[in-house]
Image (spheres, helix red, strand yellow):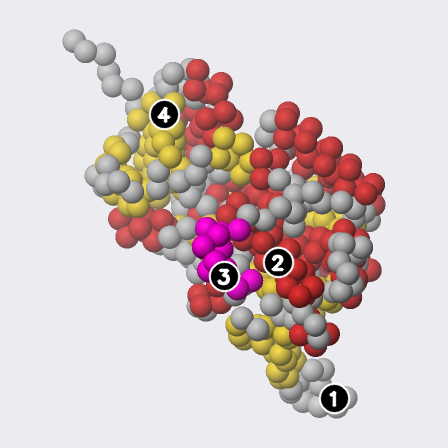
């Protein structure tokens, strides 16, 4: 009699959630196949540093095979660089980009998220978002290229759009991008051009709601906005973008109603902001793989395209399929009745890591015939940096409650927290050295921009 077949677990995506799931399952008697379209794991919280030339790409990424070398030695992990193009939940297989069908007994989907332009996908070519290394390289080329083009302009009026940078969306990514871009203009490049004075650069941060960092408490949002303005960032809240093209941004704002006027009678004003460099940090949408999974498994999607999951992160009617990370519309469930209502899990890296480990535990529970457990998210707080010696921290401290602070101490806390969570000693060491050097000198040496192949043939694309 042949020995029983080892359960096959397929994990799609090697972001924070997928990586955590692999590590939690690797010691068990299961056969794991990890599928990712890239060959590297990316530390996304520091991706904006690559886009703004503060760090090189290897400092915030690591080859998947190297990152999981210990797990590979156990002999039950296969890593495939491929793109999953389809999922057949009833038949229990995923389809790869070469047409290969990969069977599974249990599936964990951690495909992540992409940019959302709220129905205006034509804006993407003019306002790139920041999710991948390719996005970071594109933004870096646009930012550095804008200063170079401004240097070539003979007239001040022609330079202004090249020296005006617009960041749309004042969440953590938008705030970090705006603050860092202002620092580059004010310090890093201040003495490197002859015709232009980069200190006259305008960085405009546009936000649709009434404050920046909407996920933080209002007091920290106000402090962040104050710190942004000290860095010469023009913060415009309560503004709705209505158009983006190659020459700038169109947006509308509401003026305050006159005293005694009827409530809600504020006038809508249209604005035009000429700019050659626009960065999108306003919207996030789930991976298109969510729609394929919903069609196959009959799962529901929320407004952002995320897959609605059961309390244990599985799909209704398909307990062998789990969805985690930014692709999952998940709730954090209290430990018992009377301890509060379920709350949405935020789309942050700690949530993805915790979901990865929880999904792995529930897979093992199903294999062993045990009951699964509902997911409970442990919220440790939020961090956001604004710029040099400026950050905000909102921590959940057991017993003592919330610990909130801003400024230089918050910036130090943010810095060392991110170094600690980076994967690999080499990355931690390199980032620490680069940041220390940048702190004392304001220099950013990751400013090399490779020209596309078309430029070498004389067909140089417009910046």
Q: Is residue 299 visible?
A: no
Dot 4 or dot 2: first in sequence order is 4
- Are there few (<14), some (14-19), or many (20+) residues within 10 Å of tag 3? few
Q: Which mark is residue 461?
A: 3
Q: Residue at x 69, y 64 (%)?
A: 151
Dot 1 corresponds to which residue? 258
Dot 4 corresponds to which residue? 78
Q: Residue at x 57, y 43 (%)?
A: 44
Start and end of the magenta stretch? 451-463
Quarter of the image with the C terminus is: bottom right
* Local SS, label 4: strand
244 vs 31, left or right, is: right
- Are there few (<14), some (14-19), or many (20+) residues within 10 Å of tag 1? few
In this view, which residue lies farthest toward the top?
1
Q: Nearer the viewer, mark 3 or mark 4?
A: 3
Dot 1 or dot 2: first in sequence order is 2
Q: CA distance from mark 2 to mark 3?
A: 11 Å
> Disc 1, disc 2: CB below 8 Å?
no
449 vs 199, nearest the viewer: 449
Dot 2 corresponds to which residue? 145
Residue 435 within the magenta-colored segment of the rendering: no
* Local SS, label 3: loop
Q: CA distance from mark 4 to mark 2?
A: 41 Å
Q: Residue at x 38, y 28 (%)?
A: 79
Q: CA distance from mark 1 to mark 2?
A: 44 Å
**Would you place residue 276 above or below residue 452 in this image?**
below
């Amino acid at each position: 009699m042949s020995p029983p077949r080892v359960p096959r677990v397929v994990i799609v995506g090697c972001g924070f959630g997928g990586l955590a799931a692999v590590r939690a399952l690797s010691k068990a008697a299961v056969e794991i196949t990890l599928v990712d379209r890239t060959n590297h794991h990316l530390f996304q919280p520091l991706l904006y540093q690559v886009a703004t030339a503060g760090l090189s790409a290897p400092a915030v990424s690591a080859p998947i095979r190297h990152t999981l070398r210990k797990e590979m030695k156990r002999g039950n992990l296969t890593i495939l660089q491929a793109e999953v193009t389809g999922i057949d939940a009833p038949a229990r297989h995923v389809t790869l980009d070469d047409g290969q069908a990969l069977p599974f007994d249990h599936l964990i989907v951690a495909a992540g998220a992409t940019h959302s332009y709220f129905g205006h996908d034509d804006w993407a070519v003019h306002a790139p978002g920041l999710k991948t290394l390719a996005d970071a390289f594109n933004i870096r080329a646009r930012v550095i290229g804008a200063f170079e083009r401004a240097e070539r302009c003979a007239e001040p009026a022609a330079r202004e759009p090249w020296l005006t940078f617009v960041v749309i969306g004042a969440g953590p990514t938008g705030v970090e991008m705006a603050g860092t871009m202002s620092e580059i203009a004010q310090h890093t490049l201040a003495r490197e051009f002859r015709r232009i004075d980069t200190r006259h650069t305008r960085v405009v941060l546009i936000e649709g709601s009434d404050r920046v960092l909407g996920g933080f408490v209002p007091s920290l949002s106000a402090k962040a906005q104050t710190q942004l303005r000290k860095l010469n960032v023009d913060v415009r809240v309560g503004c709705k973008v209505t158009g983006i093209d190659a020459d700038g941004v169109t947006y509308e704002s509401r003026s305050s109603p006159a005293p005694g006027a009827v409530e809600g009678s504020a006038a809508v004003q249209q604005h035009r902001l000429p700019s050659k460099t626009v960065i999108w940090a306003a919207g996030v949408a789930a991976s298109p793989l969510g729609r394929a999974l919903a069609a196959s498994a009959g799962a529901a999607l929320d407004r952002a395209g995320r897959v609605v999951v059961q309390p244990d992160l599985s799909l209704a009617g398909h307990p062998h399929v789990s969805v985690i990370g930014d692709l999952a519309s998940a709730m954090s469930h209290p430990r018992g009745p009377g301890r509060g209502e379920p709350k949405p899990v935020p789309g942050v890296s700690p949530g993805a890591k915790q979901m990865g480990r929880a999904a792995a535990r529930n897979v093992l529970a199903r294999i062993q015939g045990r009951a699964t457990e509902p997911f409970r998210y442990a919220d440790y707080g939020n961090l956001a940096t604004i710029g040099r010696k400026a950050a905000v921290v909102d921590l959940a401290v057991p017993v003592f409650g919330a610990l909130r602070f801003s400024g230089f101490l918050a910036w130090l806390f943010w810095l060392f927290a991110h170094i600690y969570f980076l994967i690999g000693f080499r990355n931690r060491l390199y980032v620490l050295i680069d940041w220390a050097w940048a702190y004392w000198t304001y220099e950013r040496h990751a400013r090399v921009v490779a020209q596309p192949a078309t430029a070498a043939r004389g067909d140089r694309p417009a910046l």
